[in-house]
Image (cartoon, helix red, strand yellow):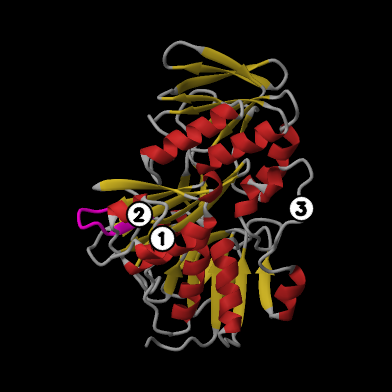
């Protein structure tokens, strides 16, 4: 049990992790001062809809984690459009860009990440957009109009969801991915093939193993993309979705240990015992010393909650089981576990054309599960992943065998 928090808790970053941390501090009974510092003009909101519902022609209301009324009711001081310029660890203060100073007893860094951009000529062209904030989503939604020529750079989840949204409004869509398969970091070749076929069927020009070398502005607002093989493509809009860069500059300047993000232990604590971190900006030190980076809304939420509890002095042992979901056209894709090199992949046909994919290690333990259009199977497999269950390969592949009976 750590020291109980008294005094003030300051949270830098008002996204998914920061919003959940603020909520949790209050729900767990903390009565001290909470200051939530965010660089956006709106309160903390759910991020997954940005690449889904918020790109539809008529977007639903933004789902807030904490409305302005809730922030006031819970006595959380929300500083909108504010930027933290420096942390003074010795005096335990944060200095904002306007030179104002805030004292802290515990500090949480949940500064998220910024869209990664390829190092190519013309990447700052007017036609280029990214998708990280509600402002980005609003601008992108306005640009997705029937007949617009859209080039999506990156065959990961953001790129695929943007491609699906663009096709839904009859845009002409070309998607390019430098690798040989889609979603290479988080899924199997079977999933990549399925997604490629899905998008080709819906009219997306999917180009794998293709690299852009430059963007040249063309016309009033469009640009010409030039590729490594000498080909070119004229488009109205380029959407870049190739991952993120953790916003760890503030932590580095404060001499906190960073390595592809702010390094934290299983108590979400940084190299300074009074400073915690959560969400996309973190790199979790695992039991074997390796660093785990999870860029997902589920981790941001769960780690934000865990960090708040650790700040309060509660016993915390954060051991996330990765979970991710994506909606593309009428297909739901769900993933649980650590996708990566595996000994064997077993495929099971599910109801209504769905597919369940089990990724097994050398001991036949389920390291990750991928389900496409099969949410019922996913619920069971997510439990198996969390339990480290061993799977009978033959029984799993036989759809006539009850899924719950495939673990041994």
The residue that disc 3 covers is 60
Q: Is residue 248 magenta?
A: no
The residue that disc 2 covers is 396
The residue that disc 1 covers is 403
The residue at the point 48 percent across, 83 percent down is: 312
- The part of the image, by quadrant, that contains residue 103 is bottom right
- The part of the image, by quadrant, that contains residue 158 is top right
Q: Quadrant of the C terminus?
A: bottom left
Nearest the viewer among 62 and 348 is 348
Horizontal side, residue 62 vs residue 19: left or right: right
Nearest the viewer among 339 and 356 is 356
Q: Secondary structure at mark 2?
A: helix
Query: Residue 5: x and y, percent?
Result: 48, 86
As drawn, 230 above or below 267 = above
Q: CA distance from mark 3 to mark 2?
A: 40 Å
Q: CA distance from mark 2 to mark 1?
A: 7 Å
Q: CA distance from mark 3 to mark 1?
A: 37 Å
Q: Which residues are magenta?
A: 360-368
Label 1 neighbour load within 10 Å: few <14, some 14-19, many 20+: some
The residue at the point 77 percent across, 56 percent down is: 61
Nearer the viewer's eye, disc 3 or disc 2? 2
Query: Residue 63: x and y, percent?
Result: 70, 60
> Circles 2 and 1: CB distance less than 8 Å?
yes
| Residue 190 visible, this angle | yes
Q: Quadrant of the N terminus?
A: bottom left
């Amino acid at each position: 049990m750590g020291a109980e928090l008294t005094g003030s808790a300051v949270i830098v970053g008002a996204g998914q992790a920061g919003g959940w941390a603020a909520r949790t501090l209050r729900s767990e009974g903390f009565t001290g001062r909470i200051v939530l510092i965010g660089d956006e003009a709106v309160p903390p909101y759910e991020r997954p809809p940005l690449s889904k519902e918020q790109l539809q022609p008529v977007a639903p209301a933004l789902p807030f984690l904490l409305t302005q009324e809730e922030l006031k009711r819970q006595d959380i001081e929300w500083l909108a459009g504010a930027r933290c310029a420096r942390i003074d660890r010795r005096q335990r203060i944060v200095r904002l860009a306007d030179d104002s100073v805030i004292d802290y007893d515990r500090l949480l860094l949940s500064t998220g990440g910024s869209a990664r951009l390829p190092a190519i000529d013309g990447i700052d062209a007017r036609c280029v957009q990214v998708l990280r904030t509600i402002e980005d989503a609003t601008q992108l939604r306005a640009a997705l109009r029937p007949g617009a020529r859209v080039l999506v750079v990156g065959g990961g989840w953001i790129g695929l969801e943007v491609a699906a949204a663009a096709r839904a409004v009859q845009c002409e869509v070309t998607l390019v991915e430098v690798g040989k398969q889609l979603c290479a970091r988080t899924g199997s070749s079977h999933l990549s093939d399925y997604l490629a076929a899905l998008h080709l069927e819906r009219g997306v020009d999917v180009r794998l193993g293709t690299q852009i070398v430059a963007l040249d502005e063309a016309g009033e607002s469009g640009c010409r993309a030039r590729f490594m093989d000498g080909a070119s493509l004229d488009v109205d809009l380029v959407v870049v979705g190739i991952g993120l860069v953790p916003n760890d500059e503030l932590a580095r300047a404060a001499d906190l240990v960073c390595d592809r993000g702010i390094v934290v232990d299983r108590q979400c604590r940084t190299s300074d015992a009074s400073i915690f971190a959560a969400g996309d900006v973190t790199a979790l030190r695992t039991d074997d010393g390796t660093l785990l980076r999870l860029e997902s809304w589920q981790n941001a939420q769960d780690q934000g909650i865990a960090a708040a509890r650790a700040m309060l002095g509660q016993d915390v042992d954060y051991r996330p089981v990765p979970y991710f979901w994506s909606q593309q056209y009428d297909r739901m894709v769900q993933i649980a576990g650590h996708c990566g090199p595996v000994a064997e992949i077993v495929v099971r046909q599910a109801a209504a054309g769905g597919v369940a994919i089990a990724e097994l290690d050398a001991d036949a333990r389920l390291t990750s599960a991928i389900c496409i259009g099969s949410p019922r199977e996913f619920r069971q497999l997510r439990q198996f992943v969390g339990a480290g269950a061993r799977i009978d390969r033959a029984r799993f592949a036989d759809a006539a065998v009850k899924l719950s009976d495939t673990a041994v």
